[in-house]
Amino acid sequence: MLLALAGVALSGAESGTVTLKAIPGAMHWTSTATSFAVHGDDALEIAAPRQTDWFNSPFDGGGKDNSPRLLFDADADFVLTAKVTVDFHAPWDAGVLVIQADPKHWAKLCFENSSDNKPTIVSVVTRDASDDANAFQVDGNSVYLQVARVGAGLVFYASADGRAWKIIRVFTIADPSRKLQAGFSSQSPNGEGHRTVFSNIRYRPQRPVDWWRGE
């Protein structure tokens, strides 16, 4: 069951910026959500439309770029954390933390329904073409995800409790002088749409004290 939250729902047709106390500055949309809502100071909900994804095929160069993404300008070093709860329906439905340098250089950390309907931690790193790597399966429909920037390096993490972190991937998409955007997304590449709730959102404008441990 998806996390129940009290908040103000907004239609996906509404444009403009979104503010959340946990995030510095305004967030803006790339593509349109079916619906979204802000819940209190540190939670939001994004409903993905049907057949929505963000992926550049390494096989034929084709791709899709229509998943709703809510992005903000990140600091030179930062840590972004959220509990991600997904109303899974179809294979590849996912709640996602994203990072973008430009349309050809971006990455996403997904809590995704696998092809055999097993919730799984998945990472995608795109430098023109996208790669795709599965990490491990998760019991239930909630998990904590974390993204950190340390100079030129980026680190993806996952956790069952938001305290003990497992590194999913260490990588780069841009040199340290490049500004990055970070944020939240919900996707339904093969389905009719679903909802993701991002709660316990935290943002720190600094690198982790110990990036290996995610702290």
Image (cartoon, rainbow, N blue to C red):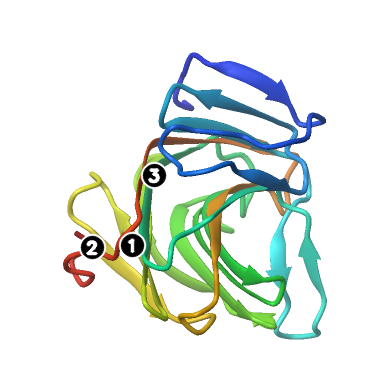
Dot 1 and dot 2 residues touching (CB under 8 Å): yes
Mark positioned earlier in the residue sequence (1 or 2): 1
Rendered location of residue 103, percent (x, y): 72, 71
Q: CA distance from mark 2 to mark 3?
A: 13 Å
Q: Can you tell which mark lies on residue 82?
A: 3
Amino acid type for the residue under numbered disc 3: Ala
Amino acid type for the residue under numbered disc 2: Gly
Q: CA distance from mark 1 to mark 2?
A: 7 Å
Q: Can you tell which mark lies on residue 214?
A: 2
Q: Mark 1 falls on what kind of element? A: strand
Task: Note whether 195 is above or below 62 in the view shown.
Answer: above
Task: Note whether 200 is above or below 191 in the view shown.
Answer: above
Report the residue marked by disc 1. Answer: 157
Q: Residue at x 55, y 26 (%)?
A: 38
Between circles 1 and 2, the one closer to the viewer is 2
Rendered location of residue 104, percent (x, y): 70, 77
How many marks do you count on the picture? 3
Amino acid type for the residue under numbered disc 1: Tyr
User: Viewer-proximal residue, 102 or 162?
Assistant: 102
Q: Is residue 138 left or right of residue 60?
A: left
Q: Mark 3 falls on what kind of element? A: strand
Q: CA distance from mark 3 to mark 1?
A: 11 Å
Residue 110 visible to an observer of this rendering:
yes
Q: Residue at x 60, y 43 (%)?
A: 27
User: Viewer-proximal residue, 39 or 92?
Assistant: 39
Residue 113 visible to an observer of this rendering:
no
Q: Mark 2 falls on what kind of element? A: loop
